Image (spheres, rainbow, N blue to C red):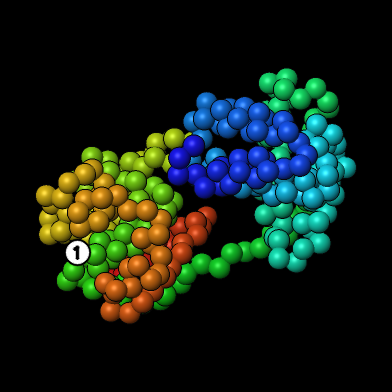
Amino acid sequence: MPDLPHVQRLYDFVDSMSMGHNWKAYIDAFLCGCRMKNLSPNTINGYAERLGYLARFLDNKDIDIEDVVRVHLQDYVMSLINNPNVSDSTINGRITVYKIFFNCLEDEELRTKPNPARKLRKIKAQKVIKETLTPEQISAAAATANKRTFIGYRNYCMLMLFVDTMIRRNELLTLTIENVDLKHGLIKVLGKGNRERFVAVGAETQKIMHFFFQRWQKGLPGDRVFCTQQGRPLDKDNLRFPRISGHMKKPWHIGFRRRSDGERWNSTTIRSGV
């Protein structure tokens, strides 16, 4: 599968393994099932990364994939629990993938032995309140944008839309011109699971987007709202320091997290003149 580095690394590793010669056939079946479910490339790539960790663990223990039982998976989970650099959410994410993987093999009747992940339980994860940006921090970030350049104003517009709507990063990057309705203050985004939804856009952000379309975006090739000056689509790296810092008065790098009270918080931020 092109452009999925973890998938390629997984195949390369299982080809070199001393144990588990059925890994490749199982991975083929699993990835085929993922594609039939229309999972996103990022999701499939993430699944492959997590399977690669398990494959390396089993290979180091000289455990054939055909001989895997629940205690082997539990041993692997315990090794993660004992690693202070691995979070509870990371462990549970891997458990989820392994359950999906072995459930797939069971459903397709590819593996005749009992499903080792059937009764594998997630660990009790600590619930941590994630840090979010304050309105003052967002104002400071917005103030660094050089609005006299295409890239500076584009990044400013992206920041304002991001904050106002709390859409996901990929939804922002893949937003198309035809799915922006500034007259009614709506955008249509394609989210996880290829599900479309409408998202309201605040009045101030509508003005910012309108100016961006009229001053900078008009006439560019392609259908993406946010693109390069040549009209090529952006990728997630375009949201990271230092690629955008050359077009800012000051370098900045900001990540956003969704909040349950995001709508109220965002509207207050925009009204305050961010």
Pointer 1 residue: 150
* Lateral position of residue 237 relative to residue 212, left or right: right
Residue 210, located in which quarter of the rendered image? bottom left
Label 1 secondary element: helix
Residue at image location 49% in from the left, 37% down from the top = 1
Locate the C terminus by quadrant: bottom left
Residue at image location 42% in from the left, 75% down from the top = 137
Question: Between 214 and 113, which is closer to the camera in this rendering?
Answer: 113
Which x, y percent locates residue 50? 65, 47
- Mark yes or no: residue 241 visible: yes
Residue at image location 56% in from the left, 42% down from the top = 7
* Outermost residue toward the right in this view: 71
Residue 250 position (above or below residue 234): below
Which x, y percent locates residue 97? 67, 41
Residue 273 position (above or below residue 4): below
Question: Between 196 and 207, which is closer to the camera in this rendering?
Answer: 196
- Mark yes or no: residue 267 visible: no
Task: Tell me the amino acid under the disc marked 1.
Answer: Phe
* Lateral position of residue 119 relative to residue 214, left or right: right
Residue 215, located in which quarter of the rendered image? bottom left
Residue 104 position (above or below residue 146): above
Report crowding for label 1: few under 14, some 14 to 19, many 20 or more residues within 10 A (C-alpha). Answer: some
Residue 214, located in which quarter of the rendered image? bottom left
Residue 102 position (above or below residue 72): above
* Outermost residue toward the bottom in this view: 250
Question: Between 17 and 51, which is closer to the camera in this rendering?
Answer: 17
Which x, y percent locates residue 41? 48, 40
Which x, y percent locates residue 87? 70, 60
Task: Please count the marks in the image.
Answer: 1
